[in-house]
Image (cartoon, rainbow, N blue to C red):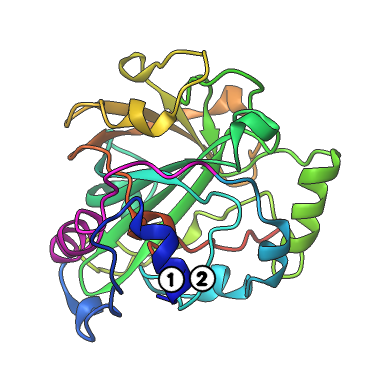
Amino acid sequence: MAAKELTSVIEFWPGAHDLDALPSEYESWSAAQKQDYLWQQRLLKSRYDRLPPLRKIDVIGLFRTALRQKMDRRSDQAPARWQKAIHAHGSVAQIKFAPIADSPYTGLFQGVDHGLLRVSVTGDPSDRGFAPGLALKFFVDGHPSENVSALVSLTGQGQNYNFFAHEFSNIVPVVHQLGPRLINLIFRRVSRFPTKISLEDCSEVDQHGQRVTNPRFPGQIFLHPTEAVQFAETPHDFREAMAKIPVGTHLFAVYGVTEGQEGKRNLAQLIGNIHTTSEFVASFYGDSQLFFRHQRFKNR
C-alpha cells in the first residue's frame, strides 16, 4: 500500500496495513477453508471503524485499468494497484445458494454452501442517482471460484434508495445516455457484449470440484429481492442498512431462463434461493482487493 493510500485509508481503518498475497496453496483448499480465510483474515481484519464517503465514478481510472484482467484473472484477490473505478464502496456477506428440487441446471446451480456476496452502488448516488449492483462468488473445492455480477440497470433507479426495490440480472439493456455509453465503449475493448455476463462456467463444475460432463446453464437469471429486505426509499447510506440484516436472511429468489430465451422474463422459472450466513461487513479489503471475475458472453 503506497504511503498516500495508507494516509487516506487510516482515517476509516485505524489499523491499516498491507494485506499480503494469498497463500501459495490457497487454491488447493476446500471451499469452506477459502471462504473462512477471506472472511476472517481479510474482510473482518480490514473492517472500517467509520464508513468512507461514496466516490463518484472514476472514468479516467477505468480507462487506465487493465480490463482484460477483469475477464481473464482466475483469483479471488485483485492484482496490485487494482481500482474499483465504478463500484468503489460496498458491503460483503457470506451466503449460500439452495437450488430447488429437480433443477435443470448443472454444476454450481445444484447448490453452493460457501459463497460471498458484495453489494455496491455505481458511483455516488447524490451525483447520478441510486444505481445498485452486486457480485457473487461461489467457492469450489481445489479449484478457482466462479463469479456472477448483476445490475438493476445501467441507469439505476433515480432517487429511490431502496437497494432491493427491483430485480437484478446478469444481462441489462443497452442505453444511449452519455455516461453509460462511454463506460460501455471502454469495456468493449475486452468484450463484445459489455452489458451481458455469461453463466456458463458456473455450470461446468460443482462445489466439490467435480467437472460436469454435459453442462447446462441458464442464459439469464433474475435475482428477485424478498420482502425480508425492503429498505426506505429516502436517502440513506445503504451500507448502514445492510449491516442490520440478520444472519440467515432470505435475500433473493433466483429465477432463470434457458439459453436462447434471454430477455423473456415471463418464461423464467424459480431455480433456487440465496440466504445470508453472516452479517454484512464494509471493509477495505472488500472495497479494494476482493476480486470478482466477469465471464465474457458468447453470442451462439
Q: Nearer the viewer, residue 163 or 98?
A: 163
Q: Residue 57 vs residue 223: left or right?
A: right
Q: Residue 236 vs residue 44: left or right?
A: right
Query: In the drawing, what numbered circle is on residue 106?
Result: none
Query: In the drawing, what numbered circle is on residue 82?
Result: 2
Contact between labelled residues 1 and 2, with CB atoms less than 8 Å apart: yes
Q: Residue at x 28, y 70 (%)?
A: 17
Q: Residue at x 49, y 58 (%)?
A: 200
- Name the amino acid, label 1: Ala
Q: Which residues make up the magenta segment? A: 31-54
Crowding at dot 1, Cα within 10 Å, few <14 / some 14-19 / many 20+, comes out as many
Task: Tell me the element at label 1.
Answer: loop
Q: Can you give x and y, in whole percent of width and height, for residue 127 in the image?
A: 68, 34
Q: Is residue 151 above or below residue 217?
A: above
Q: Residue at x 48, y 75 (%)?
A: 73
Q: How many marks?
A: 2
Closest to the camera, between mark 2 and mark 1, is 2
Crowding at dot 2, Cα within 10 Å, few <14 / some 14-19 / many 20+, comes out as some
- Name the amino acid, label 2: Trp
Q: Residue 60 vs residue 140: left or right?
A: right
Q: Can you give x and y, in whole percent of width and height, for residue 164 in the image?
A: 45, 23
Q: Quarter holding the N terminus?
A: bottom left
Q: Quadrant of residue 27?
A: bottom left
Label 2 – label 1 distance at C-alpha: 6 Å
Q: Which residue is mark 1?
A: 78
Q: Quadrant of residue 296?
A: bottom right
